[in-house]
Image (cartoon, grey):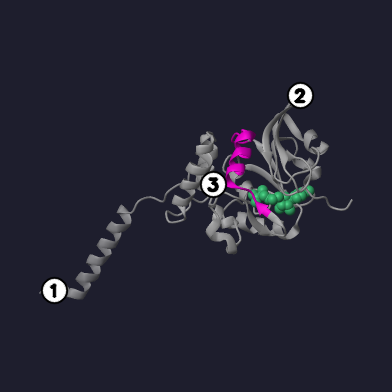
Amino acid sequence: MKRPIPWIIAVVLLALVAGVFVMRTAPPPRTLSSPTPTPLPDDRVEERQRMVDRQIRARGVTDTRVLAAMEKVPRHAFVPSDVLDQAYNDYPLPIGYGQTISQPYIVAVMTELLKLKPGEKALEIGTGSGYQAAILAELTDKVYSIEIIPQLAERARATLDRMGYHYVVTKHADGYWGWKEHAPFDAIIVTAAPDHVPQPLLEQLADGGRMVIPVGPPGGYQSLWLITREGDEYHNFNWGGVAFVPLTRLEQ
Ligand code: SAH
């Protein structure tokens, strides 16, 4: 005579079958369209959209790749905790050591002027918080950034790694000299103001390359220049007035 299956075994069997079914019907893992992490839905996305709409798009920035990068990169991850609530406001913020993370609009304008295409090589002078480097890293996978204050260089490296931007190459040095080993660069962005355009940076700009740089006396207002190289000719366009921290120098 056949013994009936005890009910407990029946329940276990049912659970197993249900488990397999759930596993089969679970959606496949999502593949990211870019190598960087997508911010979570509650990751201050709305504040970022508002920042882009009101501070950036409304003032005439139209490059859709730049706007998308500014919408994606969580700026609040790059600012110190004491100014966290102001991360999406329309002004620069202190990042320690007398330095600042630039106003979002100025980051967008400078990035738009660079006309960076995927695969092009970009150099930033003045890593600071690492935020501008992350924006560049949304536009190309070849980003180099130099910072003169060792503590900032270290902190930005850690932030960039935490946010998944491992492929941004950083170093602690005086950016006046550029980064000869990796030259030429299709784009150079200087986020601290020298009183003249450093000759090494002009030399390390590729033919057809673009450099965006604030130039002027320290402590005052400077002019933001777009310098475009064509062969041995350099064309200059003055975008307008800006206020940056001075480009400092290491003792020679
Ligand atoms: N791009 C930064 C803004 C940084 S403010 C950001 O997104 O947060 C300017 C930075 O330039 C400061 O961190 C300052 O220490 C750095 N800096 C000044 N002179 C420099 C130099 N000669 N070489 C490299 N970095 C320099």
Amino acid of disc 1:
Pro
Front residue (pair 237, 18): 237
Q: Amino acid at mark 3?
A: Pro
8, above or below 144, in the image = below
Q: Secondary structure at mark 3?
A: loop
Point out residue 185 in the picture as x, y percentages from the top left corner: 71, 36
| Closer mark to the observer between disc 1 and disc 2 | 2
For disc 3, the marked residue is 35
Q: Nearer the viewer, residue 15 or 175?
A: 175
- Residue 229 x %, y %: 73, 27
Q: Is mark 2 within 8 Å of ligand 1?
A: no
Q: Residue at x 27, y 57 (%)?
A: 21
Residue at image x 42%, y 53%?
Answer: 41
Instruction: Give the residues in magenta.
Output: 100-119
User: What residue is drawn where x is 60% and y is 57%?
Assistant: 79
Of the numbered discs 1 and 3, the one sitting upstream in the chain is 1
Disc number placed over residue 231 in the picture, else none:
2
User: Ligand 1 within 8 A of label 1's CB?
Assistant: no
Contact? badges 1 and 2 (CB < 8 Å):
no
Whether residue 93 can be seen here:
yes
**Which mark, by number, is residue 4?**
1
Give how far apart the Cα atoms at labels 2 and 3 are. Answer: 34 Å
Task: Name the secondary structure under disc 1.
Answer: loop
Q: Quadrant of residue 226?
A: top right
User: Residue 74 at x, y = what percent?
Assistant: 53, 52
